[in-house]
Amino acid sequence: MAPQEFAGLLQEKDGIITEVLILPGTESSDSNAVLRLYMMPNIKAAGSVHSHPGPNRSPSQADLRLFSKTGNCHIIVGHPYNSQSWTCYNREGEVNDLPVLDVEFEDYEDI
């Protein structure tokens, strides 16, 4: 989505994040992304993921409001959008350790 912001909800199975759910009606722009949480199906989100257009990955006040509504694992990805340019936060906006696992899924349909 760069240079526009991207946003999605995180889905997990057995404590491992397995999917990013893109909600219908999600809007992206150069300055923000808007998730329409009322479009969320009857499922529980583990948290959220969204991008910032620059390298600053600190949560804004709007980010903190979103964090308080869904799960406890919120990832912000910043430019240059690589494996080192992301930070995970808890619902209060504190840095949350999130290990990256090298997992092979035997049957994608079971996820």
Image (cartoon, rainbow, N blue to C red):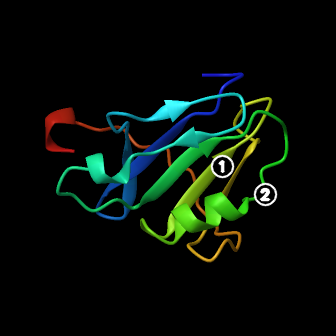
Residue drawn 44% across and 68% down?
Answer: 69
State left or right for residue 80 relative to residue 86: right
Q: Nearer the viewer, residue 36 or 44?
A: 36
Which structural element holds mark 2? loop
Which structural element holds mark 1? strand
Q: Amino acid at mark 2?
A: Ser
State left or right for residue 3 relative to residue 102: right
**Circle 1: is it few (<14), some (14-19), or many (20+) Cα within 10 Å?**
many
Up/down of 40 relative to 28, above or below = below
Up/down of 81 relative to 99, above or below = above
Residue 82 spot, x, y in % from top left: 72, 32
Q: Nearer the viewer, residue 4 or 106?
A: 4
Q: Nearer the viewer, residue 86 or 64?
A: 64
Residue 8 appears in the figure: yes
Up/down of 61 relative to 27, above or below = below
On-image quarter of the C terminus: top left
Q: Which mark is residue 58?
A: 2
Residue 55 spot, x, y in % from top left: 85, 40
On-image quarter of the N terminus: top right
Residue drawn 49% across and 53% down?
Answer: 48
Residue drawn 77% across and 50% down?
Answer: 57
Q: Which mark is residue 76?
A: 1
State left or right for residue 34 relative to residue 110: right
Number of numbered tags placed on the structure image:
2
Residue drawn 33% across and 56% down?
Answer: 12
**Circle 2: is it few (<14), some (14-19), or many (20+) Cα within 10 Å?**
some
Residue 107 appears in the figure: no
Q: Amino acid at mark 1?
A: Ile
Q: Quadrant of residue 109?
A: top left
Evaluate if marks 2 and 1 touch, with contact meaning CB atoms under 8 Å apart: yes
Q: Quadrant of residue 35?
A: top left
